[in-house]
Image (cartoon, rainbow, N blue to C red):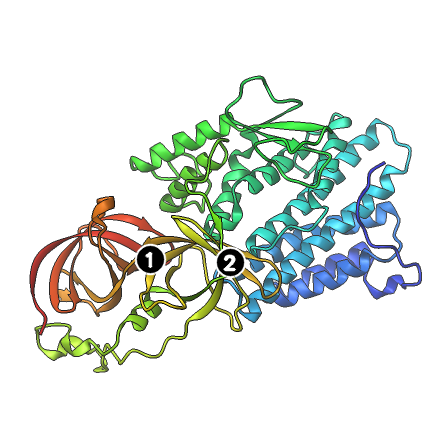
């Protein structure tokens, strides 16, 4: 018998607490304030919560869920847009949006689980098998949406989610309906494989823009993977799924002797490799058939990353060592790090030209004395040659994002080093874990003024990253992401020199910064 976790039906609740008549429900859903995603989601969560706890027969519940499904999808899409600018820990409005997104998908999935439990106790013929397959596919999709909501908020997936997804897939497989779509429900194996590939993509390491690209890619090409009964004798592109566990896919069995499946990713990896090659040689996403909304740079970065993750055998480059809990100070963002490192105002010394270059069109000064920067305090969980794992409970929303530049300093040190956030996790409402990669043991503040033709732009804060001769790394500049253009010339004021440089290729880029090589065209003492 199918085992699914659902709340108890309360027969004392009155059905009039929520609208159950299809026509009236349709009218109510059409009046929801979709321009206000938070208000819409709150109303949907409340209505679904009530429907999931009052007695309804199968046909009535199924008809209502069909009406709610497009409204839930529309509200979820709006909440995901709100979350696109959210960091870790989130601001209150972003925290509310993330919480509502998870609750809405969870209540939506509960409705389908109620329906499946009721239907599974009835005797049914072949015509009912199709109906069961349709409801099972919608239930799987709702659980996958719960999973995705957790990834978008960098939260752990709920206990029991993987066990239920495994069971639902096996139900459609036993009925011979796993690969068949019914009405508007896609095949169950397509939804199930999307959930497996989402987990294998290592979402804690992804920005929300990359997660959005990943969803688009999976909807278009996820069907290229194959689910097999058992692993082949030789296969370099596959993952074991232990279907009698509450775990997602993994490269190796964990010792369980129960039922398992094999996810063959070879064909998908071939497509990813071809996609990466064509993007790198200048083809546009549209020309190579990528879905609308996938940009070149993010798609190329994602394709290269997924090739490593969806092809088993990747190993950690450096061993991590537990740390006894030492403390470290953190400042995030290029501008904040620049202010931290500047001890005196540099504006008056920036250029040897007249002082009118230091004012904007409205006559106000382009620079001001650096304002105070408060560092946040974190605990080192473990350490390696490449980076650190940090944990903390910040008192204020720091709005940290994957790809943010960080200045790090041990409590007993006076030197700030440079790092970048590679992954984030929200363990609960306040506790945060960060994975950071070291970029440089030293950084220095600079001002950078792009030269576009004969017009000089406003100076921008940047960071000078000294080269490491042992690693054959040249000096580099770390700039806010909106400045860089290949081949552009710029003035760089770096105490006690002023340079004119040309921007060369990027060593790395994230949504927050560009780390670039440069060529010095001229050098003179700053005045």
Disc 2: CA contacts within 10 A as few (<14), some (14-19) or many (>=20)? few
Reply above or below: 229 against 434. above
Residue beneath the point at 20% across and 48% down? 469
State the image coordinates of residue 143 (x, y, percent, origin top left): 68, 46
Residue beneath the point at 73% across and 55% down? 107
Which of the two marks, 1 or 2, is nearer to us in this view?
2
Disc 1: CA contacts within 10 A as few (<14), some (14-19) or many (>=20)? many
Reply above or below: 79 against 238. below
The quadrant in which the N terminus is found is top right
Closest to the observer: 78 or 215?
215
**Drawn side of residue 293 relative to residue 176, left or right:** left
Residue annotated with mark 1 = 513
**Residue 476, quarter of picture:** bottom left
Q: Secondary structure at mark 1?
A: strand
The quadrant in which the C terminus is found is bottom left
Residue 308 visible from this viewpoint: yes
Residue 179 visible from this viewpoint: no
Closest to the observer: 278 or 4?
4
Q: Residue furthest right?
A: 12
**Drawn side of residue 369 relative to residue 95, left or right:** left
Residue beneath the point at 86% across and 55% down? 8
Reply above or below: 464 against 495. above
Residue annotated with mark 2 = 324
State the image coordinates of residue 307 (x, y, percent, origin top left): 44, 34
Disc on the earlier residue, 1 or 2: 2
Q: Secondary structure at mark 2?
A: loop
């Amino acid at each position: 018998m199918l085992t699914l976790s659902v709340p108890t039906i309360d027969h004392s609740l009155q059905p009039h607490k929520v609208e159950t008549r299809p026509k009236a429900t349709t009218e109510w859903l059409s009046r929801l304030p979709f321009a206000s995603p938070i208000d819409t989601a709150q109303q949907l969560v409340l209505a679904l919560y009530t429907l999931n706890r009052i007695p309804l027969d199968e046909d009535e519940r199924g008809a209502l869920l069909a009406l709610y499904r497009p409204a839930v999808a529309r509200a979820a899409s709006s909440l995901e847009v709100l979350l696109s600018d959210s960091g870790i820990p989130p601001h209150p409005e972003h925290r509310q949006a993330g919480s509502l997104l998870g609750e809405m998908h969870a209540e939506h999935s509960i409705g389908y689980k109620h329906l499946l439990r009721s239907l599974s106790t009835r005797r049914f013929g072949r015509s009912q098998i199709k109906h069961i397959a349709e409801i099972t596919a919608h239930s799987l999709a709702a659980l996958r949406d719960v999973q995705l909501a957790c990834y978008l908020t960098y939260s752990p997936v709920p206990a029991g989610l993987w066990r239920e997804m495994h069971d639902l897939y096996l139900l459609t497989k036993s009925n011979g309906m796993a690969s068949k779509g019914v009405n508007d429900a896609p095949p169950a194996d397509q939804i199930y494989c999307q959930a497996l590939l989402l987990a294998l993509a290592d979402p804690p390491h992804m920005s929300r823009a990359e997660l959005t690209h990943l969803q688009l890619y999976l909807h278009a090409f996820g069907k290229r993977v194959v689910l097999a009964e058992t692993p082949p004798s030789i296969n370099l592109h596959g993952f074991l799924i232990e279907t009698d566990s509450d775990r997602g896919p993994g490269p190796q069995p964990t010792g369980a002797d129960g039922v398992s499946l094999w996810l063959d990713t070879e064909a998908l990896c071939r497509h990813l490799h071809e996609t990466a090659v064509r993007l790198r040689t200048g083809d546009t996403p549209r020309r190579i058939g990528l879905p609308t909304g996938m940009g070149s740079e993010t798609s190329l970065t994602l394709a290269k990353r997924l090739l490593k993750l969806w092809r088993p055998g990747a190993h950690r480059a450096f061993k991590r060592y537990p740390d006894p809990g030492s403390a470290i100070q953190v400042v995030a963002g290029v501008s904040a790090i620049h202010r931290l490192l500047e001890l005196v105002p540099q504006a008056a010394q920036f250029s040897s030209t007249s002082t009118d270059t230091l004012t904007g069109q409205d006559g106000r000064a382009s620079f001001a004395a650096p304002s105070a920067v408060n560092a946040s305090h974190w605990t080192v969980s473990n350490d390696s040659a490449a980076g650190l794992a940090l944990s903390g409970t910040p008192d204020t929303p720091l709005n940290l994002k994957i790809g943010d530049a960080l200045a790090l300093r041990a409590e007993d040190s006076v030197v700030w080093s440079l790092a970048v956030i590679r992954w984030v996790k929200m363990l609960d409402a306040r506790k945060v874990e960060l994975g950071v990669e070291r970029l440089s043991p030293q950084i220095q503040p600079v001002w950078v003024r792009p030269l576009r033709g004969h017009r000089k732009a406003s100076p921008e804060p940047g960071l000078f990253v000294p080269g490491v001769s042992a690693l054959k790394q040249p000096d580099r500049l770390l700039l806010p992401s909106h400045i860089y253009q290949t081949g552009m010339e710029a003035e760089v004021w770096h105490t006690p020199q002023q340079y004119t440089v040309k921007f060369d290729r990027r060593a790395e880029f994230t949504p927050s910064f560009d780390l670039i090589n440069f060529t010095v065209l001229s050098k003179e003492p700053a005045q």
